[in-house]
Structures are given as structure tokens and as C-alpha cells.
Amino acid sequence: AQSVTQLGSHVSVSEGALVLLRCNYSSSVPPYLFWYVQYPNQGLQLLLKYTSAATLVKGINGFEAEFKKSETSFHLTKPSAHMSDAAEYFCAVSGVGNFNKFYFGSGTKLNVKP
Amino acid sequence: DGGITQSPKYLFRKEGQNVTLSCEQNLNHDAMYWYRQDPGQGLRLIYYSQIVNDFQKGDIAEGYSVSREKKESFPLTVTSAQKNPTAFYLCASSTFPGDEQYFGPGTRLTVT
């Protein structure tokens, strides 16, 4: 079975600082990997996805993530945080087997301080 | 514009009543999903459907039922058997199982 671990349920950064949200997965085969963002009382919006092409994936709103197979990680970064980045972020993995089911991490709430 | 609609945004019901949450998509996606979200617990899969007239139980299907009579529609019924129905419910769809999921805006259900 696959699983996703997001380290840190809450992360706080200052405006303009680097954003780093961590995601590790367990999978026996190369998976598809995703990052989603959720603003309060809204649905999830896809930030970016990895599907076995380039290991560095660029997404919307200046976010990017790097797939590191040796570390089974897919951390999300942004060089300079904006106040509007304050939201909850979810990492997700899918892959072969089990009807290609999606597995979501438990989420990381990002707080951006002025 | 293509997308997923969920209605209503907020729903209030008395304990013991069944309630149906609507989910419609015009993305021509085969697969559809229902998730429940509670504070601090991430997303939990209730039911999913890979194709019309077929659906499978997810991780927390007890007390819920679904139907998939049309490709565009995947309504969720929260029955009186669901012990803690108050939650935020999210519907999603994808071209095929395992591909990126597109989410609706959610329905917040409060049962008192």
C-alpha cells in the first residue's frame, strides 16, 4: 500500500522568505505525485504534478517541486512567500494497482507573517 | 467554462434525516470521487466511481450511499445511519483513476 507523509502540520514563514513544505511517499513503483492548495472553505486546486518526466516540476503561483527517487521525496518550494500563499497544502500520490487510487497527505497549513 | 459544481454550499439538517449532496461535472471525466474533510484529518475517501453505473466503497463508506446513472452526475446521500455527518464534503473527478483530480467548491453539512 502507498502512503504519504507531510512533515509539519503547521509551517510559519515571514513574507519574502523561502517556503519549504515537505512530502515523503512510500511506493514500490514510480508514482504520480501532486501538490494541491486549499483556501478556507474552498475546494482543492492543483499546484503541480509529476508524471515521470522532468524531476523538477514548475507549477502555478511560483511554486515548484523536485522529485527525488532516492529519498522518496517531493518537497514543495517557493523562493519568496507572499501573504496570499497562506493556505493549506496537500501532497498526494497515485500509482499502479488498487485502481490507481489517490493517497493524500494530512496537509500542512502555511502561515505567512508580515 | 468546464468544471465541477456542488450544491448547496451550506446545508443544515436535523438528526435522523437523510440528505443528498449534488455533484455535477462537465469535464467529460469518467472517474468521480467523494471525500469527507474534518479539521486536522485531511481528506478521507467515501466512494468513487470509475464509470457510469459502477461505484466502489472508499475508506469510510458506512452511512453513505451514491449513484452514478449519468456520466456528469455523482450524488451523495448522507443517511441517518452516519453517526457524525457534520463535515465538509468535497466532490472530485478525473479523466481516469490515478490522474489529477479536479475538485468542486465543497458543501459544508451541519447536522444538529
Image: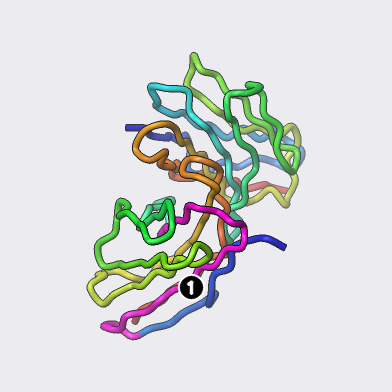
Q: Quarter holding the N terminus of chain A?
A: top left
The three-letter code of the residue at mark 1 reads Ser
Label 1 secondary element:
strand
| Rendered image quadrant of residue B20 | bottom left
- The spot of residue B25 in percent (x, y) is 57, 63
A57 is higher (above) or lower (below) than B69:
above
Instruction: Please say whether residue B103 is visible from this viewpoint.
Output: yes
Q: Which residue is mark 1?
A: B22
The chain carrying label 1 is: B
Give B16 or A30, whichever is nearer the viewer. Answer: A30
Determine whether, in the image, residue A13 is placed left or right of residue B40: right
Determine whether, in the image, residue A29 is placed left or right of residue A56: left
- The spot of residue A112 in percent (x, y) is 67, 47
What's the residue at 51%, 24% (across, down)? A73
- The spot of residue B40 in percent (x, y) is 42, 53
Instruction: Please say whether residue B38 is visible from this viewpoint.
Output: no
| Rendered image quadrant of residue B79 | bottom left
Magenta segment range?
Answer: B14-37
Query: In the rendered picture of this protein, how many numbered marks are placed on residues?
Result: 1
Magenta span contains residue B36: yes
Q: Residues within 10 Å of mark 1 (few under 14, many from 20)?
A: some
What's the residue at 26%, 67% (across, down)? B63
B63 is higher (above) or lower (below) than A25:
below
- The spot of residue A93 in percent (x, y) is 47, 36
What's the residue at 47%, 43% (across, down)? A9
What's the residue at 75%, 38% (across, down)? A62
Magenta span contains residue A110: no
Visual colour scheme: rainbow
